[in-house]
Image: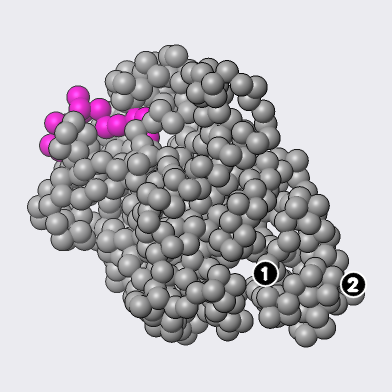
């Protein structure tokens, strides 16, 4: 089921194999018809992760990148929509030589060709493929068919791992294996026998449960891997290695650890020890709107930001206390803004649409005036410019053309090429996406953070700082700390005489790693702690 930890399990297996000296890459297969994740609502789907080459994809690719410390590309992402689109285009171009094009085998064959392409391009020893959804669903049947066909083609080259949930009903207090038995049965019906079963549960798996799964799911007891809830996702590879998962996988492939093996996961274990032992906290508030769904609070909409904050906090041996602050509350109740004074630092993340923007602007102004460390990401940077224009430059009706298209003073305006795209209603994969250069101004917070003059960061936006306002913004004291050298677009803004007030048009959170926190998040946390 969704959220059970397929992505973390995939990333963890990759980390283990990487530590044993192998080159690893990972692919996410999403069964929805969408060509990519770019047009999806973050509340429904979770965070939209962006690769260096500008693909808007599932958040699991972010987990793969963070665990493997590898930059992935479009070749690491497959959806039903992408596969069908390619097959239909080929049919239109007579690339099937006029024969009848069928769902099976042509859709599975296209999936297999994409997997092989990723293997070839990356030169990986292992390609880990996560199939989204739940076994037995109509949506992912074609991908299971592709998996079956791959196994038939290469019996010794393909291994199947089933990740299944073992509930412990409160009324009974006993771990139940029946859902896992049913999942294995559904896989068998698809022509697939799992080689390894990862048993996700609240607790460690005991011997009777392992034995039961072994008997009824037709796997060795040693291939039933216990995966209890962990304090941190970064503990999962350690748990798996305690169960000898890496060696079980290599044995099934008739392989041994590589020459550059680092089997003890030394740096990773050091990180986990830090996570477990830190006591002092640093309190960070995230002012947003993509986390309320009914009575529940979802963190998935901002998962890369959360992880980037954690990475930087652990770097300073601090425990991050992250709290969700609803921008809408500050619009309804102006006094509620005072709660921001309780935090060591405030982040305003990216987003789309006008809901909550005035509340975010109030929060940004509070941070600017009260000298609270502030980090604005994408929309968080744009709104910081709006707030400065209104309250320092005195242009009270300043706004973004996204929220006030007929406004007079659009200090944030749509990029010229985007006007045509939106007029033609071409929304999918048409934003300014992926890696772009940024030249950093000397003697700025950003310059101190990066320690270099030119950087590359990932983007996802349609709007930018309007050049017509740059003169007055800089005259009034706003620091343009980074620009794109090719188009002179504003990439980073800062405030003078402030412990840390930085806004970025790009998304630095995408490039943060657990053992290598992103420079801007690191320096933001340094200011928060100070």
| Residue beneath the point at 26% across and 41% down | 436
| Residue beneath the point at 47% across and 25% down | 427
Quarter that holds the N terminus: bottom right
Question: Chief secondary structure of the magenta span?
Answer: helix
- Of all residues, the one furthest to the left in this rendering is 442
Instruction: State the image coordinates of residue 34 (x, y, percent, origin top left).
Output: 58, 33
Q: How many marks?
A: 2
Magenta-tinted stretch: 461-475
| Residue beneath the point at 82% across and 83% down | 208
Does residue 440 appear to the left or right of 286 in the view shown?
Answer: left
Instruction: State the image coordinates of residue 177 (x, y, percent, origin top left).
Output: 83, 70
Between label 2 and label 1, give the one nearer the viewer. Answer: 1
Q: Which mark is on residue 196?
A: 1
Does residue 265 appear to the left or right of 216 in the view shown?
Answer: left
Q: Is 55 drawn above or below residue 246 in the view shown?
A: above
Q: Which of the two residues, 29 or 301, is positioned nearer the viewer here?
A: 29
| Residue beneath the point at 54% across and 50% down | 28
Residue at the spot of label 2: 171
């Amino acid at each position: 089921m969704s959220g059970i930890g397929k992505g973390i399990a995939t990333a963890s297996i990759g980390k283990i194999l990487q530590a044993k000296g192998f080159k690893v890459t990972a692919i996410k297969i999403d069964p929805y018809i969408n060509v990519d994740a770019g047009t999806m609502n973050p509340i429904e789907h979770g965070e939209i992760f962006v690769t260096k080459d500008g693909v808007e994809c599932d958040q699991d690719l972010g987990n793969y990148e963070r665990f493997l410390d590898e930059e992935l590309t479009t070749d690491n992402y497959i959806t039903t929509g992408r596969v069908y689109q390619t097959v239909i285009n080929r049919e239109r171009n007579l690339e099937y030589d006029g024969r009848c094009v069928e769902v099976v085998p042509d859709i599975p064959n296209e999936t297999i060709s994409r997997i092989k392409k990723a293997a070839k391009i990356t030169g990986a020893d292992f390609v880990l493929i996560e199939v989204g959804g739940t076994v037995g669903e109509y949506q992912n049947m074609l991908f299971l068919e592709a998996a079956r066909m791959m196994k038939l083609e290469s019996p010794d080259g393909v291994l199947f791992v089933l990740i299944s949930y073992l509930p412990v009903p409160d009324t009974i207090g006993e771990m139940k294996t029946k859902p896992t038995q049913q999942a294995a049965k559904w896989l068998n019906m698809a022509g697939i026998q799992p080689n390894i079963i990862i048993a996700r549960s609240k607790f460690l798996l005991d011997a009777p449960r392992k034995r039961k799964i072994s008997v009824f799911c037709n796997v060795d007891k040693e291939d039933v891997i216990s995966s209890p809830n962990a304090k941190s996702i970064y503990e999962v590879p350690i748990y798996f290695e305690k169960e000898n998962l890496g060696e079980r996988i290599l044995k099934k492939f008739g392989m041994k650890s590589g020459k550059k093996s680092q089997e003890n996961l030394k740096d990773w274990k050091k990180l986990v020890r830090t996570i477990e032992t830190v006591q002092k906290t640093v309190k960070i508030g995230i002012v947003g709107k993509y986390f309320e769904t009914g009575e529940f609070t979802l963190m998935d909409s901002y998962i890369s930001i959360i992880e980037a904050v954690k990475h930087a906090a652990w770097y300073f041996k601090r425990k991050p206390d992250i709290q969700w602050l609803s921008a809408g509350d500050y619009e309804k109740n102006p006094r509620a803004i005072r709660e921001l004074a309780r935090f060591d630092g405030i982040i305003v993340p990216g987003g789309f649409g006008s809901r909550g923007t005035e509340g975010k602007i109030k929060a940004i102004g509070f941070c600017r005036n009260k000298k609270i460390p502030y980090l604005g990401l994408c929309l968080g940077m744009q709104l910081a410019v709006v707030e400065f224009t209104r309250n320092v430059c005195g242009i009270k009706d300043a706004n973004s053309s996204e929220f006030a298209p007929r406004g007079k003073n659009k200090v944030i305006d749509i990029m010229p090429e985007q006007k045509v795209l939106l007029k033609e209603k071409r929304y999918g994969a048409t934003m300014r996406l992926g890696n772009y250069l940024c030249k950093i101004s000397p003697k700025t917070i950003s310059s101190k953070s990066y320690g270099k003059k030119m950087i590359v960061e990932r983007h996802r936006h349609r709007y930018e700082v309007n050049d017509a306002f740059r003169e007055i913004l800089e005259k009034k004291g706003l620091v343009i700390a980074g620009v794109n050298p090719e188009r002179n677009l504003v990439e980073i803004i800062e405030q003078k005489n402030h412990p840390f007030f930085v806004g970025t048009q790009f998304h630095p959170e995408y490039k943060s790693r657990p053992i290598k926190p992103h420079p801007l998040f690191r320096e933001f946390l340094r200011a928060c702690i100070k």
